[in-house]
Image: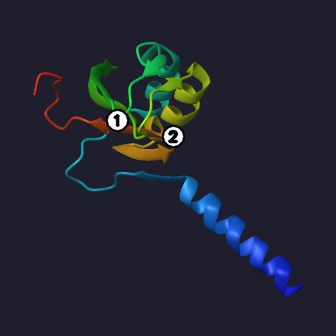
Amino acid sequence: MKLFNLSILTILSFTSSTAYAAGCFVDNSYASGNPTLAVSKVKELCRQYIGNVPANYNGYNCHYIGGIPYAITARNLGNTEAYFAADTCTDHFTKVLSCLKGGDFKWFPWQFIMMVKASGSCNN
């Protein structure tokens, strides 16, 4: 392969790796949820987040799914208002809802965080 092609591949791999980062929480201090049930509720959960989102806004809610409290946050990390579309929400929240203990996924300008609350309650 030519050096030029290798340079382009290197640049492309770097830019795609910085476009998003994801991870499931594995620490035992986090409670376990029900990923199958949580993913089945993703469209219902996304309804409250759809629309124009102000710059640097954190949208937080706690939902009971199968009696388990899920702390769910959608953030606009950008410096300008952005439209949060239904398909963006379902596609990317599915990634964190698929994690047993929760997770964190970034797809600029969005950040999606879900944590199963160890307290067993949305009230604390």
Name the amino acid type tagged 2.
Lys
Q: Above or below — where is 27 with respect to 53?
A: below
Can you tell which quarter of the image residue 48 is in?
top left
Residue at 30% across, 29% down = 70
User: Split into 4 quadrants, where in the image is the N terminus?
Assistant: bottom right
Question: Is there a contact, CB below 8 Å, between mark 2 and mark 1?
Answer: no
Q: Tell me the element at label 2.
A: helix
In the depicted view, which residue is nearer to us: 95 or 32?
Answer: 95
The residue beneath circle 1 is: 56
- Give how far across and how far down residue 42 sits, in percent: 49, 22
Q: Is residue 9 left or right of residue 102?
A: right
In the depicted view, which residue is nearer to us: 110 or 42?
Answer: 110
Mark before the other along the chain sequence, 2 or 1: 1
- Give how far across and how far down residue 82 sits, in percent: 49, 28
Q: Above or below — where is 96 with respect to 43?
A: below
Q: Is residue 78 left or right of residue 64?
A: right
Residue at 16% across, 25% down = 121
- How busy is the neighbourhood of tag 2: few (under 14 within 10 Å), some, or many (20 plus)? many
**How are the residues colored?**
rainbow
User: Split into 4 quadrants, where in the image is the C terminus?
Assistant: top left
Which of discs 2 and 1 lies nearer the camera? The answer is: 1
Name the amino acid type tagged 1.
Asn
- Give how far across and how far down residue 77 sits, in percent: 40, 41
Q: Tell me the element at label 1.
A: loop
Separation of disc 2 and disc 1 at Cα? 22 Å
**Taking the image as drawn, is residue 46 in sight?**
no
- Give how far across and how far down residue 21 sits, in percent: 49, 54
Q: Is residue 2 left or right of residue 103?
A: right
Residue at 84% across, 77% down = 5
**Taking the image as drawn, is residue 70 in sight?**
yes
The residue beneath circle 2 is: 95
Q: Is residue 66 left or right of residue 98?
A: left
